[in-house]
């Protein structure tokens, strides 16, 4: 059985998993925002912390400043994500108190 179509073009998943919160092999639906970020911590079971870098405009100084935020995201076991990997996240229903995103693609390390 192949992976389920989640609605956006992503690289094919090679491994199969039994995770109910996997968008490809479980029943989790994805929607909304798509974010590209880098994994900074993979020490939790099934969850990773990613760092999202962005540029913020300061109107008073008419300049831009770099900022970042940390986002907790669910990591399906079929993607095998490690710290340092560049990943793509998508919004989903809240899985826990802090997790409302799921990793849908591993872009490299």
Image: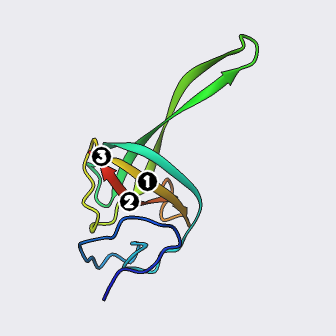
Residue 22 figure quarter: bottom left
Residue 84 figure quarter: top left
Left-right relation of 99 to 56: left
Give me the disc on residue 85. Answer: 3
Image location of residue 1, percent across then percent down: 30, 89
- Residue located 50% across and 31% down the image: 68
Q: Secondary structure at mark 1?
A: strand
Q: Are marks 2 and 1 in contact (CB under 8 Å)?
A: yes
Q: Are marks 3 and 2 in contact (CB under 8 Å)?
A: no
- Residue located 27% across and 76% down the image: 17
Give me the disc on residue 105. Answer: 2
Q: Nearer the viewer, residue 2 or 78?
A: 2
Category of crowding for the residue at label 3, using alpha-carbon neighbours closer than 10 angstroms: few (below 14), some (14–19), many (at least 20): some
Left-right relation of 58 to 40: right
Image location of residue 97, percent across then percent down: 51, 57
Q: Secondary structure at mark 3?
A: loop
Category of crowding for the residue at label 1, using alpha-carbon neighbours closer than 10 angstroms: few (below 14), some (14–19), many (at least 20): some
Give me the disc on residue 106. Answer: none
Left-right relation of 34 to 103: right
Q: Where 78 sits versus 84, above or below?
A: below
Image location of residue 63, percent across then percent down: 66, 15
Image location of residue 85, percent across then percent down: 30, 46
Q: Where 4 sits versus 82, above or below?
A: below
Q: Where 26 sits versus 12, above or below?
A: below
Q: CA distance from mark 3 to mark 2?
A: 10 Å
Q: CA distance from mark 2 to mark 1?
A: 5 Å
Q: Nearer the viewer, residue 41 or 13?
A: 13
Q: Earlier in the sequence, mark 3 or mark 2?
A: 3
């Amino acid at each position: 059985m192949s992976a389920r179509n989640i609605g956006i073009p992503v690289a094919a998943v090679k491994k199969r998993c039994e995770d109910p919160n996997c968008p490809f092999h479980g029943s989790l639906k994805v929607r909304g925002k798509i974010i590209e970020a880098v994994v900074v911590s993979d020490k939790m079971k099934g969850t990773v912390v990613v760092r999202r870098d962005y540029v913020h405009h300061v109107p008073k100084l008419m300049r831009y400043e770099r900022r970042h935020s940390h986002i907790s995201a669910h990591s399906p076991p079929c993607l095998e994500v490690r710290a340092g990997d560049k990943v793509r996240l998508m919004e989903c229903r809240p899985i826990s108190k802090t997790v409302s995103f799921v990793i849908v693609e591993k872009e490299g390390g």
